[in-house]
Image (cartoon, rainbow, N blue to C red):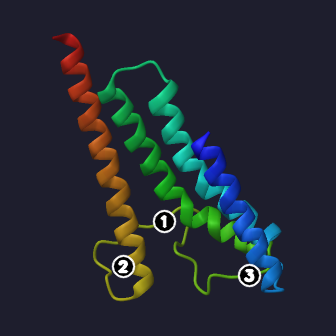
Amino acid sequence: VYFTLETALLLLLELVCSFESRTFWFFLPGLPITLYLAALPWAVMLLIRYVPIRGWFKAAGCCGLLALYHAATPAVVERILALSGEEMGRPLAKFPWFTFQPGDWSTPWAIGNNVNALISLGLVVLAAVYLVVGILRQRQ
C-alpha cells in the first residue's frame, strides 16, 4: 500500500509540475523515465517480501538486480530521451550499455563510464559473495 501510494503521489506531482510549467514533459519523457526508475524499488520490495528464499539469497538477488539496473539505466534513459526528441549531449557510452576504459580518465564522460562499470562490477562481486555465504549457511 505504501509503495503504491508513494508511486501515485510521485506521478501526480510530476503531472502537476509539467502542466504548471507549461512544458508538458510529463507524458514523454517524464512518465516512461519515472516508471522505469520506480521499477527498481518495486522489484527489490517484491523480491524481499514475496520470494520464499533465505535472506542471503535475497541479498544476492537484490545486488544482482541493482547491478543489472545500474548497467542498463544510462542506455534506457538515453533511448527515452531520444524518443522525445531530446539529447544527452554526448552519450554515456559508445555501446548500448557502457564501456570501461581503465586507462582513460580524461573527460567527464570517460570518468562516468568507468565509475558506472566499477559500481556494476562491485555489485556483481557482492552478489556472488552473498550467494556463496547463503550456500555455506544452508549447508550448516
Q: Earlier in the sequence, mark 1 or mark 3?
A: 3
Percent coordinates x, y for residue 91 in the rendering: 58, 78
Position of residue 35 in the picture relative to residue 92 (left or right): right
Kindly identify the residue that appears in the image at 59 percent across and 64 percent down: 75
**Residue 124: x percent and y percent?**
34, 46
* Front: mark 1 or 3: 3
> What is the quadrant of the N terminus in the image?
top right
Q: Where is residue 28 in the image (x, y as percent from the top left)?
A: 80, 70
For the residues labelled 2 and 3, the Cα–Cα distance comes to: 23 Å
Query: Where is residue 102 drawn, in percent x and y?
Result: 29, 72
Left or right, 7 with reference to 114: right
Quadrant the C terminus occupies: top left
The residue under label 3 is which amino acid type? Glu
Q: Which amino acid does label 2 sit on?
A: Ile
Q: Splitting the image into 4 quarters, where does residue 137 fall?
A: top left
In the foreground, 55 or 73: 55
Task: Determine which residue is flagged by label 2.
Answer: 111
